[in-house]
Image: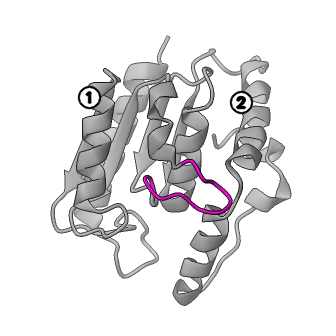
Amino acid sequence: MHRARPVLPRRFSLTVVEEEDLAKASASLSGRPNAQTIGDLAGSLAYLQNSSFVNGLIGLVGFCSGGRLALVFACNTTGLSAFVNFYSNSIFQATDANPTPVGDMLENLDCPMLGMFGAEDANPSGEDVALLRSRLESLSKIFELVTFKDAGHAFFSDTRASYRPEAAYMAWGRCLEWLSKYLKP
């Protein structure tokens, strides 16, 4: 989606925040209505689908709350060829803004999904990842879920104390392999 960034609304612009403010930022994203996320990303997808520099195969990558939002979109579109989810939170939790948890939308997932998780993460917990695996298997989806030992939430974020270079390196390699497998014509 790096090429789609120019068409995303201002609310997706990057803002640097202190680590203690990350919880507030995450809560803000979690409170976004799913319909708003779907609409925003549908516009980006349409732009890419109509761009001459795109081969027609489009992937999506999301991290943390952005991973949950990306999963919501992946479960509500047919235009993606691959999806990579890094430790998306609140997969099975309903909120006032989103009474249907994204975990209940998995039936509509229409592209191969790679999920990366930390074994020491509390959200998503190991139980959440196991439930995600069970649901994806029961729905016969194409997926791979990878859990990294000695890694917690945000293990990929090199600006946080939770950063785990080895897990991040391995996860990025898997991500690139996944995208290469499903996005090459």
Amino acid of disc 2: Leu
Residue located 57% across and 42% down the image: 72
Q: Amino acid under label 1? A: Glu
Question: On the rendered structure, is 49 left or right of 17?
Answer: right
Rate crowding at label 2 as few (under 14), some (14 to 19) or many (20 or more) other CA atoms within 10 Å. Answer: many
**Residue at screen point 50% across, 22% down:** 110
Q: Secondary structure at mark 1?
A: helix
- Give residue 81's position: percent from left, percent from top: 51, 22
Q: Quadrant of residue 65?
A: bottom right
Question: Taking the image as drawn, is residue 176 in sight?
Answer: yes
- Seen at 62% across and 21% down, the residue is 79
- What segment is highlighted magenta in the picture? 91-100
Q: Is residue 99 magenta?
A: yes
Residue positioned 55% across, 37% down in the render: 60
Pointers 1 and 2 in contact (C-beta within 8 Å): no
Q: Which residue matches tag 2?
A: 45
Q: Earlier in the sequence, mark 1 or mark 2?
A: 2
* x and y, in percent, of residue 39 in the image: 77, 39
Quarter of the image that includes the N terminus: top right
